[in-house]
Image (cartoon, helix red, strand yellow):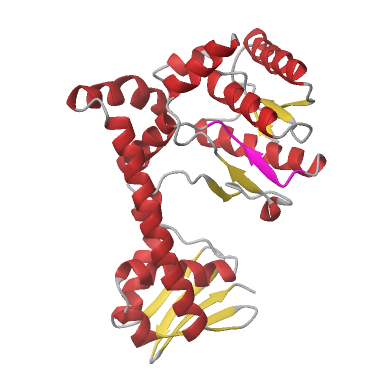
Amino acid sequence: MVACSGGPDSTATLIAIARAHPGEVVAATFDHGMRSTAEAEADAAVVRRVSCDLGISVIEGRAASTPTGEAAARTARYRWLARICSKVSASIGVTGHTRDDQAETLLLRLSRGTGARGAAGMAPSAPWPVAAPSAASLRLVRPLLDVARLEVEAYLAALGVHAAHDASNESSEYARNRVRHDVLPALATVNDQAVSHLAAFADHQREDDEALSEWAEGWLNEHGKASASTVRLPRRALGALPAAVRARVLTAAAGRLGIRLGEAHLERLGSLASGAGGRVTLAGGLGEARGTVFELRRDA
């Protein structure tokens, strides 16, 4: 399933994937309801035309209500895409994120305050990014992460394909657009390879994160004692781990209980493990350090 808005990046992705996997591809286009009907229809028309030329089917959807902001729009889109994957029996969803998108994502996350995991940016292949029925069995693949936006535009030009132009991509209302049109051009005056270097930095961070996560999983499997609602860890050994590994152990342990931990939770739980002990109330559970034991519990 290839998510296609009709814009250059996703249109180029749809064409490339359909050529590489003939007979296996379905296009999906989603209207967030945040633009005029005429603009949305023009974008959908591009997807239909390209899909027809490729001989593939296209599924169209629209948000039940207008999302409030970029995050809500993203969530609505990925939940709908997950449903489409299930409908067409697809296990892989493909998006057209490019190297430029990777650089933008990194800068946005750093400016909002993120750790090493967030600085790893987007992965070429990753679990589905939002909770949704059947999402556990889906993978999100981004095959153009090493490709520059200018290369995408050259590819379409060589094919004689005209993609849609989304006027909202020019609006300074959205944070990503301000990074795209103001921040990255300014960085390019410092180094014309800024986008490539930012994307490479995210790649290196992801490699580090994967290594630390593997260490944490191994430690958790060796030292953790789990039941259906509880994970117990040796407090002293947990506190002695490097902070980066300890945070990943806690994240993995909480994940086994269906508990999601934010940066603030991780910092407080880490302090319990290496400090005087105590309790931290979590969304859907509790973290407690007492005596020689560190325990995460899921609410009944």
Q: Considering only vertical position in the picture, is 88 above or below 205?
A: above
Image quarter (top left, top right, bottom left or bottom right) of the N terminus: top right
Residue 114 coordinates in the image, percent (x, y): 35, 49
Relative to residue 245, is residue 12 depicted above or below? Answer: above
Q: In percent of the image, x 34 and y 50: which residue is there?
A: 204
For this orientation, the residue located farthest to the bottom is: 291
x 41%, y 44%: residue: 121
State whether residue 165 appears in this view. no
- The stretch of residues the image draws in magenta is 90-96
Counting from the top left corner in percent of width and height, residue 129 is at 57, 47
Does 187 appear in magenta? no
Image position, residue 277 (x, y; %): 34, 82
Residue 252 lies, with reference to residue 67, above or below; the image says: below
Q: Give the residue displayed 68% in from the left and 28% down from the top.
A: 19
Task: Specify the quadrant of the image occupied by residue 136.
Answer: bottom right
**Residue nearest the viewer, comparing 95 with 108:** 95
